[in-house]
Image: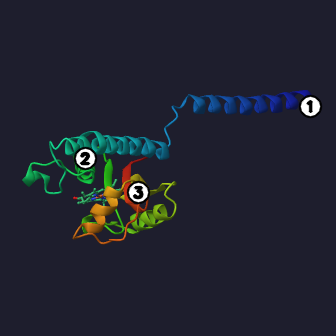
Amino acid sequence: MIEKAAGRILGKLLAILLAGVSVNVAQAAEPEGIPPELVAEYIHAVIQVDRSIYSTHVVEQLQDRKVAVAAEDWKEKGALPLPAQLLQMAGQEVQGLGLGLHIRLSSLGPVYTKNGPVDQFERAGLEAVAKNPRKPYTGIITERDRRYFKAIFADRAVSMACVICHNRHPLSAKRDYKLYDVMGGIIISFPVR
Ligand code: HEC
């Protein structure tokens, strides 16, 4: 009797253990996703590198050689778009692809009010990256029943050109920028499950 009961208990224990093993195996076999923080870092890196290459190897070179200049009203003037405009245009184009990917340049003291924060999350994020530019501000937001991962990366005045143009722009909401100040943020969001 005792042996039978012990056998049954052992059998049950083994079954439980094996079930545990099979669950673990099944979990291990699941493809591991890339954390959204890392995806945002990748997208941000590409944006920043493209912007920097465009600024140095296209805008500056052509301006130095007196071939062309970058100007805000580039369409009318037949000039080159400003790097900020290139980024905003890329953001609009990418939105048109229907991936749910959104990219834009924003600021608490923007040239255009349309570039200001659209909600409390963006406002809090722009304030946070202004205080701690090294750390992106991230979170999950829900819009029309869809969950999005949103990341805000600090955008700093890396050259005097940023400072001079923004401080001089007639529509700029802030005119006391200094070199290396955080001027705003690059906001990246994409759908997550
Ligand atoms: C020659 C002028 C000029 C220069 C140089 C310039 N910007 Fe801008 N920036 C603009 C204009 C104009 C806009 C608005 C573009 C739009 O949305 O149409 C803008 C937009 C922005 C925005 C979005 C918020 C806003 O102000 O509307 C940020 C952030 C920004 N620029 C940061 C920078 C940084 C950082 C640099 C240097 C790396 C820089 N800018 C260089 C003119 C300039």
Q: Residue at x 31, y 66 (%)?
A: 116
> How far across and how far down the image is residue 34, in percent?
49, 38
Q: Residue at x 72, y 33 (%)?
A: 16
> How far across and how far down the image is residue 150, in percent?
41, 54
- Name the residue tied to disc 1: 2
Ligand 1 has an atom within 8 Å of the beta carbon of the residue at disc 3: yes
Q: Residues within 10 Å of mark 3 (few under 14, many from 20)?
A: some
Asked if residue 46 lies left or right of residue 138, the reply is left
The front one of 103 and 96 is: 103
> How far across and how far down the image is residue 36, in percent?
47, 45
- Find residue 156 and name its label: 3
Q: Earlier in the sequence, mark 2 or mark 1?
A: 1
Q: Quadrant of residue 50?
A: top left
Q: Secondary structure at mark 3?
A: strand
Mark 3 and mark 1: span between their CA atoms?
Answer: 76 Å
- Find residue 34 and name its label: none
- Name the residue tied to disc 2: 90
Q: Do the residues bearing badges 2 and 1 touch, measured as CB atoms within 8 Å?
A: no
Mark 2 and mark 1: span between their CA atoms?
Answer: 75 Å
> How far across and how far down the image is residue 40, in percent?
43, 46
From the viewer's perspective, is residue 31 above or below residue 85? above
